[in-house]
Amino acid sequence: MVTRVLVAVDDSPASLEAARLAVELARGWGAAVRAVTVLTDGVLVESIESVRPGSEPEVRIGEAGASLLAHVRRLGDQAGVSVEPLVRSGVPYRCILDEAVAWPADIVVMGRSDRTGPASPYVGSEVARVLEFADCPVLVVPR
């Protein structure tokens, strides 16, 4: 029986679709949802010499994460599903796996990364690592 659905969200279209599906599945199962976003943007962080707590780039990243989680919470409210938002900071796949164990999740729902080309079977490095190391089922949602 599925009672806990962990959904990992970022700003990708597939991730937002994963959030919608996670809430829909949770409604059908009578499950709770925990929505986690990981505050990491490799491109942004690599381009900044030093990101200090409270600095403008960190604040903007935090606001974007809060906005994503508010969206998932609204989806839950509309469906009558309890959604608990959670912000983590670190390496995304590690944070997702840690949360799946700590909560403990019955299933992890994630969006598939966009393909790099028409013949590319790419799912994304974070998704691939969660698939490889998760102790519970992982549902990967396309865009």
Image (cartoon, helix red, strand yellow):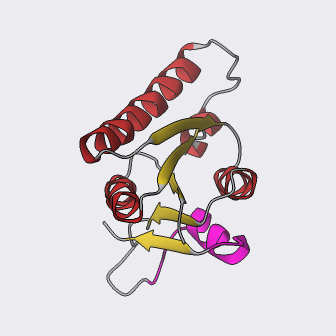
Residue 60 at x, y percent in the picture: 48, 22
Q: What residue appears at the point 45 percent right and 42 percent down from the top-left corner?
A: 83
For this orientation, the residue located farthest to the bottom is 119
Q: What residue appears at the point 55 percent right and 64 percent down from the top-left corner?
A: 108
Let me know if residue 127 is in the magenta part: yes
| Left or right of residue 18, residue 4 in this image | right
Residue 77, picture quadrant = top left
Please tell me how many numbered marks the rendered image carries: 0
Compared with residue 22, is residue 99 higher up or lower down, i.e. above or below? above
Q: Nearer the viewer, residue 61 or 82?
A: 82
Compared with residue 55, is residue 65 higher up or lower down, i.e. above or below? below
Residue 20 at x, y percent in the picture: 31, 55
Compared with residue 118, is residue 64 higher up or lower down, i.e. above or below? above
For this orientation, the residue located farthest to the left is 78
Residue 49, picture quadrant = top right
Q: Nearer the viewer, residue 60 or 66?
A: 66
Residue 30, picture quadrant = bottom left
Q: Nearer the viewer, residue 44 or 121?
A: 121
Compared with residue 31, is residue 59 higher up or lower down, i.e. above or below? above
Q: Which residues are magenta?
A: 121-136
Residue 80 at x, y percent in the picture: 31, 44
Q: Nearer the viewer, residue 114 or 90?
A: 90
Please identify the quadrant where the N terminus is shown.
bottom right
Let me know if residue 90 is in the magenta part: no
Q: What residue appears at the point 71 percent right and 42 percent down from the top-left corner?
A: 90
Residue 59 at x, y percent in the picture: 53, 18
